[in-house]
Amino acid sequence: MTKEQLLQDIYGTGLICTDLRLFLDTNPDHKEAMTDFRNHCAEYARLKEAFERDFGPLTGFNDQGFSEFSWTCGPWPWKRA
């Protein structure tokens, strides 16, 4: 999977998680929505972990296996081809 495809999947899955969470705020007893929420959140975590393993941290406040300033090791946005 390319970096762009993985980011698109992360953003889409994150949006689904947010929508389901908002739905559950007003429908906390909806079992199917809760199951979907848990499944999509697990998928989001898996996608995020895969991205960070292959391409580096998504945010500047991630401390899971990266050096403090590891995001500076790749090309700067204006130097990407």
Image: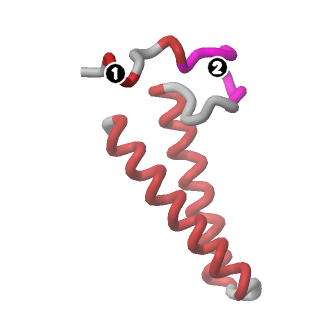
Q: What numbered label is drawn on residue 8?
A: none
Q: Quadrant of residue 43?
A: bottom right
Residue farthest to the front, as pictured: 78
Name the chief secondary structure element in magenta: loop
**Which residue shows up at 46% across the image and 53% down it?**
11
Q: Secondary structure at mark 1?
A: helix
Q: Residues within 10 Å of mark 2 (few under 14, many from 20)?
A: few
Say which residue label 1 marks. Answer: 78
> Which quarter of the image is occupied by the C terminus?
top left
Q: Label 2 amino acid?
A: Phe
Q: Is residue 74 left or right of residue 40?
A: left
Q: Label 1 amino acid?
A: Trp
**Which residue shows up at 66% across the image and 72% down it?**
21
Q: Residues within 10 Å of mark 1 (few under 14, many from 20)?
A: few
Region in magenta: 62-71
Say which residue label 2 marks. Answer: 66
Tally the marks: 2
User: Percent position (x, y) of residue 28?
Assistant: 75, 84
Q: In the rendered structure, does residue 69 fall within the stretch colored magenta?
A: yes
